[in-house]
């Protein structure tokens, strides 16, 4: 298969994708237009905000960069889904504590356009608390829920992690550990059955609240992302939960399970 055909092939098996390449730089308008043309109606792109905003400029002096990125992503039209601010782990040399981070974050959030879906991922475990969740809730921004080595999963949180009428899940795992076992991402090498059982129960309860779910798996989670999604689907069905249906143009779809 030719590399230009990968996305079209992918879109015959999954209904949405998390685009990692946008983290490194804003793509060209031509590239984004091609993404749109190569995917069917109803397909959803979740995109990461470029690192120049989240890692390099740390939300300062980045209005032009953000506006360029949003304008480019708008070329996807109705296929544009969540826009994710993926922040790194911050040492005290960058932000002395979470309050210093919030002092930077809050004014930035107030400037975000209301027509888009935004999500925030942080990697400082101790900063995740009810105050942070309420801040995101006040701005109708989703808190990214992660399954990774050093971050808590929803069952470990003592507050409601659903901060919008939709939520965003990333099954990430432990990159360093799994790369000691394999660098070929074509089969499962770590059994995630227990974790996925827990996630299925969480997603079911979240869905009952009328919350739309975007969920994405990384190869580093178990070794083969498509297998992770397939295992989740099987566990979901085995529990007798409602059928997972394809997304539609409207917001009537409750659950998206891509790779």
Image (spheres, rainbow, N blue to C red):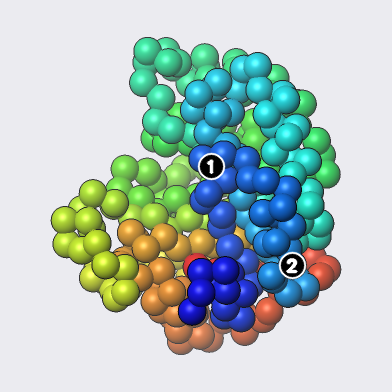
Image x and y of residue 94, in percent: 42, 15
List x then y, in percent, for residue 29. 73, 48
Answer whether residue 169 is visible to the viewer in this image: yes
Q: In the rendered image, which residue does mark 2 sit on?
A: 37
Quadrant position of residue 7: bottom right
Of pointers 2 and 1, the one earlier in the residue sequence = 1
What residue would you read off at disc 1?
Answer: 23
Q: Residue furthest front?
A: 2
Give the crowd class for mark 1: few <14, some 14-19, many >=20 residues within 10 Å: many
Which type of secondary structure does the marked residue at label 2 adopt?
Answer: helix
Residue 246 disc label: none
**In the picture, residue 219 is in which quadrant?**
bottom left
In the picture, residue 246 is in which quadrant? bottom right
Please indicate whether residue 173 sits to the left or right of residue 118 in the image. Answer: left
Nearer-the-camera pick, 93 or 212: 93
Residue at x-position 51% and y-position 69%: 3
Residue 254 x, y percent position in the rendering: 69, 69
């Amino acid at each position: 298969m030719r590399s230009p055909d990968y996305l079209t092939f992918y879109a015959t098996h999954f209904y949405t994708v998390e685009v990692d390449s946008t983290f490194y730089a804003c793509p060209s308008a031509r590239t984004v237009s091609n993404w749109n043309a190569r995917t069917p109606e109803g397909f959803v792109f979740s995109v990461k905000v470029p690192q120049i905003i989240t890692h390099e400029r740390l939300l300062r002096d980045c209005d032009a960069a953000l506006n360029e990125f949003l304008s480019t992503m708008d070329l996807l039209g109705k296929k544009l889904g969540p826009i994710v601010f993926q922040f790194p782990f911050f040492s005290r040399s960058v932000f002395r504590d979470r309050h210093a981070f919030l002092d930077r974050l809050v004014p930035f959030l107030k400037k975000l356009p209301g027509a888009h879906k935004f999500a925030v991922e942080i990697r400082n475990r101790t900063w995740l608390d009810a105050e942070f969740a309420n801040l995101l809730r006040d701005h109708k921004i989703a808190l990214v829920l992660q399954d990774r080595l050093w971050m808590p999963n929803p069952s470990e949180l003592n507050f409601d992690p659903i901060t919008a009428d939709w939520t965003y899940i990333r099954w990430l795992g432990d990159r360093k550990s799994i790369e000691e076992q394999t660098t070929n991402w074509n089969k499962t090498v770590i059994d995630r059955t227990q974790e996925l059982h827990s996630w299925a129960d969480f997603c079911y309860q979240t869905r009952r609240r009328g919350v739309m779910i975007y969920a994405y798996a990384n190869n580093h989670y178990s070794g083969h992302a498509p297998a992770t999604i397939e295992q989740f689907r099987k566990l979901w069905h085995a529990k007798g939960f409602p059928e997972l249906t394809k997304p539609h143009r409207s917001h009537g779809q409750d659950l998206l399970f891509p790779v």
